[in-house]
Amino acid sequence: MPTPIKMPALSPTMEEGTLAKWLVKEGDTVSAGDIMAEIETDKATMEFEAVDEGTIAKIEIPEGSEGVKVGTVIALLAGDGEDAGEVAASAAPKEEAAAAPAKEAPKKSESASATQGEAAVPAARTAPKADGDRIIASPLAKRIAEQKGIDLSAVTGSGPNGRIVKADVEAASPGTAAKADAASAPSQAAASAPAPTATAASVPDFGIPYEAEKLNNVRKVIARRLTEAKQTIPHIYLTVDVRLDALLKLRGELNAALEPQGVKLSVNDLLIKALARALVQVPKCNVSFAGDELRKFSRADISVAVAAPSGLITPIVTDAGAKSISAISTEMKELAGKARDGKLQPHEYQGGTASLSNLGMFGIKQFDAVINPPQGMILAVGAGEKRPWVIDDALGVATVMSATGSFDHRAIDGADGADLMKVFKELCEAPLGLVA
C-alpha cells in the first residue's frame, strides 16, 4: 500500500504553506533523510526531508502551489514490491478531486485567496507510536534527539503515519516536550478560535487607485501575532535616556584589538549583551506569563528583530549573557544573513526569553515596541544623538540614546521593570562590566 506524503507542520504556528519547489520528480527513488522539497512556512523557506525509503509514484501538489493546508497529501510513495506506475494510475481518480483546490491555488482570484488565507485549524497529528511501544522516527530525527537529550516518546510526529521528523525534534525542548504540549493546549485552542478580521471585500477603497499585493505567509503570521499581543497583553512602557560615550569609546578600542581577527562589533552587539546581563541581574523580568503559571528562565536568550524581504523575523542569540561580545557579533552576522535569505531553522527563531528592536540606524529617536508572545518584555532602542547633558555638575554635550522597555504587566510589576531599565542604563554607561 503506498505511503501518503503529507504537508508537514514545520513550525508551531504553521497552518498552511507554499510548496515552493520539488527537488524530486515522479519515478525518483528516495531514502530516509533525502531532501524532497522546499516549503515556504509562516517564518522561512525550509527543506522537507523523506522519512521512508521508496519511489515517488505521484506528485499530487505541483510546485508553486500556495495555501496548502497542513496534512494535505502532496505526494505518494511506493514501497518495496509496489509498481510506482500502478500506484499513480490507481490513485489518480480519487486523489485528483482532493488535490484540486491546492493545484488551482496559484490561479485563484484575489477574493478567493483572501478567503483561503483565513486561519484554519491544522490537521491533527497522529501519535508517534505504533506496534506496541516502538517509536517511529526518521534516522536524522533520532540522531538530533540523542544530541539534544530529547525523549522521543514525548514528541508528536508530523510525518506520514505519525513519524517523528527533523522539524519535530528541533521544535522540542529537552525533557519538556510532553509538559509543554499539555500546558500549551488550552492557549493553542484559544488562539485557533476565529476572530473577526477585515477582508479585502469589506474594506472600502473610496475610489482611490491602488495595486493589491497578496500577503505572504510571514506577513499573515506577523499580523495575527501582533494583533493577539495588543489584544491580550497589558503593556506597560518605561523609558530611560542612556549616555553612550563610554560604550562608544569601548567599542572603538575593542574593534581595534579585534581587527586582526576580522571581527567588527556593532553598537547593537553591545546592547544585546547589556540586555542579557540586565535580565540575569533582574530575574523577575526574565519571565513569561503562561496562563496559570509564571515561568522563570535561568538564562537570557535574546531575540533580535531583523528586517527580512518577507517580513520581520527574530533570530535568537542563546544564553547571550554568558557569551563574549565578539561571539555575539559573529553569531548575529550569521543569523541576520540566514534571516535575509530565508534559511533560518526553527531552533534559530523559536523561543527567546526577551527581544531587542533597534531602529536607531533609521534616525528614530524613541518608539514603543510590541511584545513578542509568549515573551514578557521587549526593549526598543533609538538613535544615539548629541544632546545637552549635565557632566560633572556642568552643562555639556553627550551622545544619548533613548531606550523603552515594553513589559507584560501580568507577569512583571512596574517596579521590577524600572529596576531592569536602571541596570541596563548602568551597564551601558559603565560598559567595562560587559567584558568582565
Image (cartoon, rainbow, N blue to C red):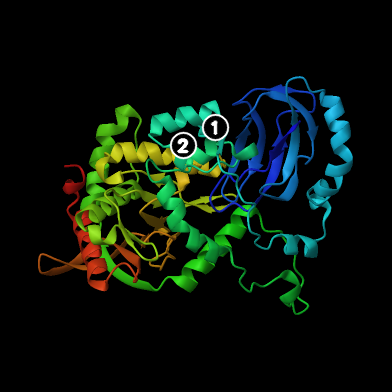
Q: Which residue is mark 1?
A: 137
Q: Are marks 2 and 1 in contact (CB under 8 Å)?
A: yes
Q: Which residue is mark 2?
A: 152
In the depicted structure, whether residue 84 falls above or below residue 387:
above
Q: Amino acid at mark 1?
A: Ala
What secondary structure is marked by label 2? helix
Give me the residue at 20% from left, 42% from top.
435
Give me the residue at 59% from left, 49% from top.
309
Q: Amino acid at mark 2?
A: Leu
Q: Position of residue 354 (x, y in %)?
A: 36, 56
Counting other residues with Cα less than 10 Å from the Cα at mark 2, is it few (<14), some (14-19), or many (20 or more)? many
Q: Is residue 90 left or right of residue 39?
A: right
Give me the residue at 21% from left, 58% from top.
282
Q: Is residue 435 left or right of residue 198?
A: left
Can residue 154 be seen in the rendering of this structure?
yes
Counting other residues with Cα less than 10 Å from the Cα at mark 1, is it few (<14), some (14-19), or many (20 or more)? many
Count of numbered badges drawn on the protein? 2
